[in-house]
Amino acid sequence: MHIKFDLKVILFVLFFFILGFEKLYLLFLIFAIIHELSHMIIGILLGFEPSKIQIMPFGAYINFKIDMKSYNMKILKGTICALKKLFVALAGPIANIIIAIIFCMKSDYIIITYINILLAIFNLLPIYPLDGGRVLKQILIILLGRRKALKYTNLFSNICLFIILTISLIFCFITQSLFMILTLLYLVHIRKREDELYRLKERAYIILEENREEIKGT
């Protein structure tokens, strides 16, 4: 498995060190990595093989190799692979919730409880590529098929992002929370990238359909 370390993590550590919040940021990063390792463990148990783990400023990201056997097994309009990916997506937030429950009984570690609750809530937002968006996508793949699932997941993600940004910006203006502002900027960045990927995939679907029509017409 290939491990990639994003050097921006060091810049973030230095940035929060200057502000005096380096311990809080490191705690956040540790539990974000535990969150991602939970994805990996469940993925391995379900038969996926991890190919790459990337350590990033706001956590980590794990890529899995496609399991062709379950990818070809149908379930409604999707595949068994979609159902497995749904469980993998849920694993991270569930791990954070379990950690939060364990540490909420110890008042000396209340900050750990808060960090894990925030991680769980943030990742369960129905915005792709967050875990909530991934869960939504896999459910829609099973119910509607892949193309419609991509369309509705992308649309719903953009609507939710707009609503959350509007509410959060008001909250940021009141609290002047720098960490929340950085989190929102990161969310906008990854959402913009995923929106561009969706448009490329939709264009590919259109080209395939046009080619099918041409083949039928010959």
Image (cartoon, helix red, strand yellow):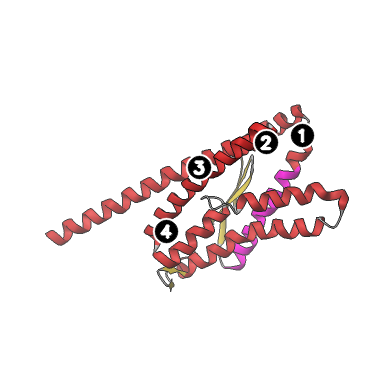
Looking at the rendered structure, the kind of residue marked 2 is Phe
Residue identifier under label 4 = 149
Q: Give the secondary structure at mark 4.
A: helix
Q: Main secondary structure of the magenta part?
A: helix
Residue identifier under label 2 = 179
Looking at the rendered structure, the kind of residue marked 4 is Ala
**N-term-proximal mark, 4 vs 3:** 4
Q: Nearer the viewer, residue 166 or 73?
A: 166
| Label 4, label 2: how far apart the Cα atoms are | 32 Å
What's the magenta region? Answer: 27-46
Q: Residues within 10 Å of mark 1 (few under 14, many from 20)?
A: some
**N-term-proximal mark, 4 vs 1:** 1
Question: Which quadrant of the figure has residue 89?
Answer: bottom right
**N-term-proximal mark, 1 vs 3:** 1
Residue at (37% x, 50% y) in the render = 201
Relative image position of residue 69 (x, y in whole percent) = 46, 70
Looking at the rendered structure, the kind of residue marked 3 is Phe
**N-term-proximal mark, 3 vs 2:** 3
Q: Dots 3 and 2: beta carbons under 8 Å? A: no
Looking at the rendered structure, the kind of residue marked 1 is Phe
Residue identifier under label 1 = 21
Left or right, 145 with reference to 25: left
Left or right, 198 with reference to 55: left
